[in-house]
Image (tube, grey):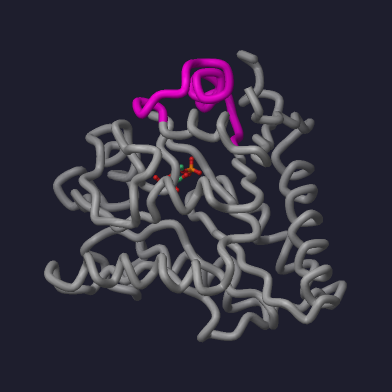
Amino acid sequence: ENIGTVVFENSTEASKAVAKEIANLIKVKQSQKQPCILGLATGSSPKGLYAELVRLHKEEGLSFKNVISFNLDEYYPMEPDSVNSYVRFMKEQLFNHVDILPENYNVPDGLLTKEAIADYCDAYETKIEALGGIDLQILGIGGNGHIGFNESGSLQNSKTRLVALDHITRVAASGDFGGLENTPRTAITLGVKKIMEAKRVILMAWGEGKSNIIKASTEGPVTSQVPASYLQEHNNATFILDQAAASKL
Ligand code: GLP
């Protein structure tokens, strides 16, 4: 078991610690005149992190000009301006409030034709590889142990691809979409392989509701049933938890 777990009093303190690590990495890369390649996540879990990064930009002058980011996933199909689109989420939470260059952030395109998806996904990975891979990947975790939208059954070497969403993932999202019948059935997700190739991985989870899946992911068997358990085989992955999410460990 290689996953480090770090438990904070609450998600605010935890998010600040993650923001500090990211800010330090951005600054190290700046001093080396290198881009900083970040893998970013959506969902409620990273909201506090993004708020703190915005604060560091506004109050402490942290610049994102050398940041190139790749988001994990997007619903498919999805209009970029829709209230539920992940590109809109990222603009509202982070991109519109910092000095990242618009050409430097990447969120999977929810408007592709079906025929274009496979080539698009290959190109998304090639772009990451050409930059030397992801320096730091931020993850949340689904109640079933999904990372990005790599649902149960996703293989450790899975590529970036179109996936069918699990029923429980759709139920969890259905409130945002005004009912299950309006909730997308598919999504585009970065594959497990690119996540595992990231040099550093930070998974954030808050609340009692995540405690069982956190236990399964960190202490249970490494299994495709719980894709987050693959992180046990990553040499630099840390789970950042609040006390409630860590309560079953
Ligand atoms: C969605 C996202 C995941 C995220 C998960 C958990 O399924 N695609 O990347 O980790 O939700 O969301 P939350 O952080 O709101 O619990």
In percent of the image, x 65 and y 75: which residue is there?
67
Q: Residue 176 appears at what percent x and percent y?
A: 34, 51
Left or right of 163, for residue 242? right
In percent of the image, x 21 and y 52: which residue is there?
186
- Is residue 227 at least partly visible in the picture? yes
State which quadrant residue 11 falls in.
top right
Query: Viewer-proximal residue, 143 or 123?
Result: 123
Left or right of 16, for residue 175? left
Quadrant assignment for the N terminus? top right
Residue interval drawn in magenta: 205-226
In percent of the image, x 59 and y 51: which residue is there?
138
- Based on the picture, tell me whether residue 19 belongs to the magenta stretch: no
**Quadrant of the picture in which ligand 1 is shown:** top left
- Count of numbered circles on the image: 0
- Is residue 143 at least partly visible in the picture? no
In percent of the image, x 41 and y 70: which residue is there?
126
Q: Residue 113 appears at what percent x and percent y?
A: 15, 73
- Based on the picture, tell me whether residue 223 belongs to the magenta stretch: yes
State which quadrant residue 136 falls in.
bottom right
